[in-house]
Image (cartoon, helix red, strand yellow):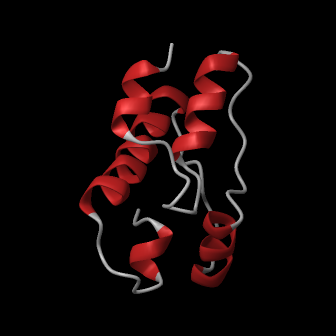
Amino acid sequence: MLPLQVLKDKGYDGTSSDIWSCEVILFVLMAGYLPFDEPSLIGLYKKIWEASFSCPSWFSSGARNLIKRILDPNPLIRITIPEILQDE
């Protein structure tokens, strides 16, 4: 699953894009399903743009907060690797 800025042809910023993509993989490993799932491509893009997903009830509040910061559709305010390392 590609980050929105790549889909919108805003260029590839490896750090920001890779953080987002890795979080999608981590979410799948933890939840057992994709955070964004939609039968139509337009619907999928809309869900990604709106960061429209929910975490399973078994995720801790810390995990939920970190996931929401990583899956932020705006790469300018998305959490950075140093901030991830500082997160509890």
Residue occupying image coordinates x 35% and y 44%: 22
Residue 44 in picture, x, y percent from top left: 61, 71
> In the depicted view, which residue is nearer to us: 11 or 54?
11
Vertical order, 1 against 84 (above or below): below
Residue 62 in picture, x, y percent from top left: 62, 18
Residue occupying image coordinates x 41% and y 42%: 80
Residue occupying image coordinates x 37% and y 23%: 85
Residue 41, quarter of picture: bottom right
Q: Is residue 10 left or right of residue 53?
A: left
Residue 81 in picture, x, y percent from top left: 35, 37
> Dividing the image into 4 quarters, which one contains the N terminus?
bottom left
State whether residue 81 appears in this view: yes
Vertical order, 29 against 48 (above or below): above
Q: Is residue 35 left or right of residue 29?
A: right
Residue 35 in picture, x, y percent from top left: 59, 48
Residue 51, quarter of picture: bottom right
> In the depicted view, which residue is nearer to us: 78 or 29?
78
Q: How many marks?
A: 0
